[in-house]
């Protein structure tokens, strides 16, 4: 009877541990490292580097990186997976320029220059679109030694760095 209870307890304990190492959870941990600015560590801990240009020195000016997981599909007997995600990168310089543009718009509206304020509103909206890079990515993942890894390609790396 004790052995049955022990086996049931081990099964209950092991199921959550196995479930936490899903493609979605590994991709989330990978992205959190990248968002924190630790690209090299993220690739080392959670990725397989399949880039042709493996230089870490060509990063662009830091910006805001966000992502949203849309779907996860596992295939090939649980050895490969695809994470469908939207990745958005907004450069810091674009955000600073947007703030200056909004300040100009408020100043023109306060002085009664409605036409100038309206023109600046159009410029601000155009600037918002120009500094954001949004892509729908199908990120490939592969199980290596029982652990899920993100396959980092040149295209994915460029998206993560806003190139």
Image (cartoon, rainbow, N blue to C red):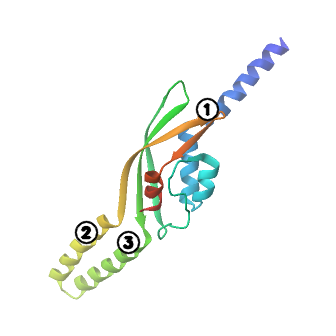
Q: Which residue is mark 3?
A: 94
* Disc with the residue nearer the chain's start (2 vs 3): 3
Residue displayed at 71% across by 23% down: 11
Instruction: Tell me how far mark 1 sits from mark 3, CA to CA.
Output: 40 Å
* Front residue of 8 and 23: 23
Choose top left, top right, bottom left or bottom right for residue 109. Answer: bottom left
Q: Tag 1 or tag 2, which sits nearer the N-term? A: 1
Res 119 visible: yes
> Is residue 125 depicted above or below 71 in this figure?
below
For label 2, the residue is 126
Residue at 55% in and 62% down = 55
In the picture of the structure, the residue carrying the numbered disc 1 is 19
Residue for point 55% across, 37% down: 142
x and y percent of residue 87 in the render?
42, 52
Extreme-top residue of the structure: 1
The residue most toward the right is 2
Q: Helix, strand or loop at disc 2?
A: helix
């Amino acid at each position: 009877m004790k052995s049955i209870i022990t086996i049931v307890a081990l099964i209950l304990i092991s199921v959550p541990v196995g479930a936490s190492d899903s493609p979605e959870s590994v991709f989330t941990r990978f992205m959190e490292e990248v968002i924190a600015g630790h690209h090299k560590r993220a690739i080392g801990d959670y990725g397989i580097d399949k880039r042709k240009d493996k230089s870490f020195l060509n990063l662009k000016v830091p910006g805001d990186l966000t992502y949203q997981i849309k779907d996860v599909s596992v295939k090939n007997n649980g050895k490969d997976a695809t994470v469908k995600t939207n990745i958005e990168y907004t450069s810091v310089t674009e955000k600073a320029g947007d703030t200056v543009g909004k300040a100009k718009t408020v100043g023109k509206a306060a002085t009664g220059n409605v036409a100038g304020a309206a023109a600046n509103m159009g410029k601000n909206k155009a600037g918002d679109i120009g500094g954001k890079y949004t892509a729908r990515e199908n990120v490939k993942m592969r199980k290596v030694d029982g652990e899920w890894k993100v396959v980092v390609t040149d295209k994915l790396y460029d998206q993560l760095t806003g190139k």
